[in-house]
Amino acid sequence: QMAYNTLLESGVTFVDTSESYGSKMAKKSLSAEHILGRCIDDNPAIDPLVASTFANPWMHILNGGGVRFGRRSVVKALEQTCERLGTSSIELYQVPAALYLGFPNALADGLSDCLDRGLCNYVGVTNMGKYRMRSMARKMERRGASLTSNQFAFSLTNRKAWKSGLISACKDLGVIPFAHTPLDGGLATGLYTNTNPSGGKAGGNFPYDLKKLNRIQPLTGMMETVQSKVKSRLQREKRDEQSRMKGYRDQPMGNINTDPTTTQIALNYVVAKGCVPIPGIKTVAQAEEVQLLDSAADAVERGKSCDDP
């Protein structure tokens, strides 16, 4: 709840979830959607923009959820999502790339029905390649709707979406490319290297084997080089800002962050490639880091102190 509140207070109001997250705890009302619903109820001052995803139909069967078939199952699944969230509708509803039982157009028909019934404002897909995404976009267009987004894995250490042309295809179609795991579980942060396999953490736990760290060493080395160049540029900009502000006693000096991290470099790469990164936030500390990054970015844009209004 505290992490959720901190995010909303910092202006981050887009929250992505799925009916499959914690689905085994749904009977105890402890699934991700149940928990998010309670967070929303406990903080009614700000309405979040919620996105959720239709569960992989095969995993749904394995988890004891039964067989889903046809367009009606898509609508029913979203109705159940809204019930768990305690809301009448959500902002974005997504369907996965997994093979779906039913007629070839069942997913598109189901998404169209969700829009027509006001259960969601926009629809998207997850982990779809460029060819299936184009096909889905055409199907939605024939139904008088549009495909809003495609969510897939993308990071400095997992660039398949870029090399396959998927990100470019999203741009051509006007589809928003959401990048989940933009730090690749920590591998893309630059913190874990073959000379520092623990990432500087005490305890000696090595989340990645040395073979993998040796393979990405040229990348982590380049991240450190870019980090150094950005740091030098920001320091120069800060000196220039301070020089310009001399003589203006009533005007506060700019407080530009001149010490970027390799994690920031990695996230900026994802943004530079045209994607919207969706990092996982579980703790207040992580939420506060997002808040600090927003403040620092605003300070750079406005040339003001992070503490200024």
Image (cartoon, rainbow, N blue to C red):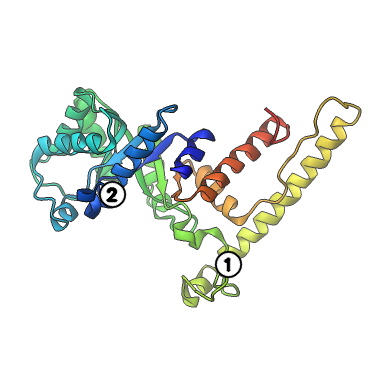
Considering only vertical position in the picture, is 202 above or below 136? Answer: below
Q: Are marks 2 and 1 in contact (CB under 8 Å)?
A: no
Which residue is the extreme one toward the right? Answer: 247
Considering only vertical position in the picture, is 289 above or below 171? Answer: below
Q: Residue 109, position in %: x, y?
A: 15, 32
Amino acid type of the residue tagged 1 in the rendering: Pro
Quadrant occupied by the N terminus = top left
Considering only vertical position in the picture, is 308 above or below 227? Answer: above
Give the number of the mark in front: 2 or 1: 2
Circle 2 — which element?
Answer: loop
One can see residue 175 in this view: no
> Which residue is at 30% across, 40% downward?
52
Quadrant occupied by the C terminus = top right
> Which residue is at 89% across, 31% downward?
246
Q: Quadrant of residue 75?
A: top left
Amino acid type of the residue tagged 2 in the rendering: Leu
Q: Residue 70, position in %: x, y?
A: 9, 39
Neighbourhood count class around disc 2 (C-alpha, 10 Å): few under 14, some 14–19, many 20 upward: some
Left or right of 239 in this view: 179: left
Q: Quadrant of residue 167?
A: top left
One can see residue 86 in this view: yes
Circle 1 — which element?
Answer: helix
Number of on-image labels: 2
> Which residue is at 20% across, 33% downward?
111
Q: Mark 2 sits on what residue?
A: 30
- Which is nearer the N-term, disc 2 or disc 1? 2
Residue 218, numbered label: 1
Neighbourhood count class around disc 1 (C-alpha, 10 Å): few under 14, some 14–19, many 20 upward: few
> Which residue is at 65% across, 40% downward?
296
